[in-house]
Image (cartoon, rainbow, N blue to C red):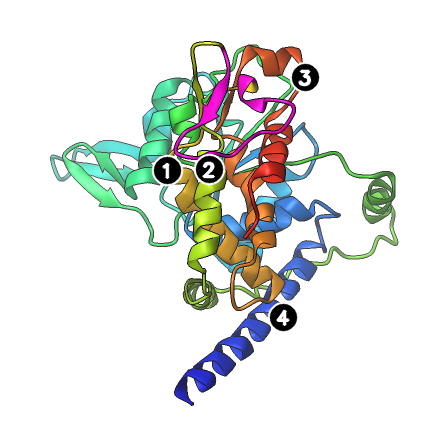
């Protein structure tokens, strides 16, 4: 009887959470038209306690989306423009000499905030990138002899431009692995672009309507409640085995004759062997990230347990930056999303 009561309480909490998450989407829509993957992905990473990498061409509202997320959550927001001349101290802070006290004082950098937008992270050299990624991984910053903890609510969103490579410093694969999700910000459809035009066409008009400011609907206490609720969503062992099988299916092992097999599995890729398109597969971090993201996907769907559809929905943003494609994939004009979709097509669904 108590188990039934607990299940009923969880279902009611999930319904209330679903209403809250729909409200979040509504508030985001006041400024962001379309971009459903980005809108859900930002909050998924925030609730899952991970970080997010946004990739898209200029002018697709990446910065605006992050600012809107900060306004909806009420969290402190800082934007850092990455440039080739940026120094690690420009992020983390430095020691400042005070003559009146005859001692050094710590001046904290912009990384000491809740939501950090690392704009065009691939424009800064490796020293600066590693300073930020160390903060992401360790949750602290060392300045001089002191190690300072970052805020408990610490969320990094890094952006990179896929069309410019001159003067950039691409993130190594091992550092990319530290991002929970990689979200692709795509061009809007014609209808969406027309809505964007109508929202902004009156910017210089005297009768311009005042901008709709998003309401702070996800305070820090609410975010913590949503995290606890997501942790209570049931994940069956068969679903966990399915997650592991998907991640494992990204790891090809070359055999003598140039064919491939799946490490620790007997799955067949079908007529076309996709493993010649993959050089390196996903790490165990991918399975952990997929587990966390699938629970948040179930929460968005209003489910009390994780379904295979939640896993499939989460697999592409979790894995697209964790697999390294071969030269054959580039020659065949295949991207990571296509490879992952083919893997999802042949891994047996429980």
> Magenta segment, principal secondary structure?
loop
Q: Which residues are magenta?
A: 258-276
Secondary structure beneath label 2: helix
- 3D distance between C-alphas at marks 4 and 2: 32 Å
Label 2 Cα crowd, 10 Å radius (few <14 / some 14-19 / many 20+): many
- 3D distance between C-alphas at marks 1 and 3: 27 Å
Q: Which residue is mark 3?
A: 333
- Report x, y in % for residue 224: 42, 64
Q: Which residue is mark 1?
A: 284
Q: Residue at x 60, y 28 (%)?
A: 339
The one nearer the camera, 305 or 269, is: 269
Mark with earlier residue (1, 3): 1
Left or right placement of residue 88 versus residue 46 in this view: left
- 3D distance between C-alphas at marks 2 and 1: 8 Å
Q: Which residue is mark 2?
A: 247
Mark with earlier residue (4, 3): 4
Q: Nearer the viewer, mark 4 or mark 1?
A: 1
Q: Check residue 295 for magenta coloring.
A: no
Q: Nearer the viewer, mark 4 or mark 2?
A: 2
Mark with earlier residue (2, 3): 2
Residue 303 vs 54, above or below: the answer is below
Secondary structure beneath label 1: helix
**Contact (Cβ within 8 Å) of mark 2 with mark 1:** yes
Q: Residue at x 63, y 32 (%)?
A: 342
Secondary structure beneath label 4: helix
Q: Nearer the viewer, mark 2 or mark 3?
A: 2
In the picture as drawn, the residue positioned furthest to the left comes out as: 102
Q: Is residue 156 visible?
A: no
Kindly indicate the quadrant of the structure image that contains residue 18. bottom right
Q: Residue at x 87, y 39 (%)?
A: 190
Q: Which residue is mark 4?
A: 19
Q: Check residue 263 for magenta coloring.
A: yes
């Amino acid at each position: 009887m108590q188990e039934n009561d607990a299940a009923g309480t969880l279902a009611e909490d999930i319904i209330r959470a679903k209403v809250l998450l729909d409200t979040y989407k509504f508030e985001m829509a006041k400024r962001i038209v379309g971009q459903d993957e980005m809108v859900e992905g930002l909050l998924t990473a925030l609730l899952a306690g991970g970080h997010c990498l946004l990739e898209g061409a200029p002018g697709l509202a990446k910065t605006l989306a992050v600012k809107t997320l900060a306004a909806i959550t009420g969290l402190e927001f800082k934007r850092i423009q990455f440039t080739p001349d940026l120094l690690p101290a420009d992020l983390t802070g430095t020691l400042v000499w005070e003559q009146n006290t005859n001692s050094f004082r710590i001046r904290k950098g912009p990384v000491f905030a809740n939501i950090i937008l690392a704009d065009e992270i691939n424009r800064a050299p490796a020293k600066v990138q590693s300073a930020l990624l160390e903060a992401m991984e360790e949750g602290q910053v060392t300045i001089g002899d002191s190690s300072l903890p970052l805020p408990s609510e610490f969320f990094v969103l890094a952006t990179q431009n896929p069309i410019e490579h001159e003067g950039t410093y691409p993130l190594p694969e091992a550092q990319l692995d530290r991002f929970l999700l990689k979200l692709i910000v795509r061009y809007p459809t014609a209808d969406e672009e027309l809505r964007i035009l109508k929202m902004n066409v009156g910017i210089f008009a005297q009768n311009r309507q005042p901008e709709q400011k998003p309401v702070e609907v996800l305070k820090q206490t609410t975010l913590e409640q949503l995290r606890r609720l997501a942790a209570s969503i049931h994940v069956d062992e068969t679903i966990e085995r399915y997650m592991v099988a998907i991640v494992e299916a990204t790891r090809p092992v070359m055999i003598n004759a140039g064919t491939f097999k799946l490490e620790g599995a007997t799955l067949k890729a079908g007529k076309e062997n996709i493993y010649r398109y993959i050089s390196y597969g996903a790490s165990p971090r991918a399975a952990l990230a997929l587990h966390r993201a699938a629970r948040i996907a179930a929460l968005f769907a209003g489910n009390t347990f994780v379904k295979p559809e939640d896993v499939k929905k989460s697999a592409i943003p979790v894995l697209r930056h964790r697999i390294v494609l071969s030269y054959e994939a580039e020659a065949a004009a295949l991207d990571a999303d296509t490879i992952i979709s083919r893997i999802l097509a042949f891994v047996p669904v429980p």
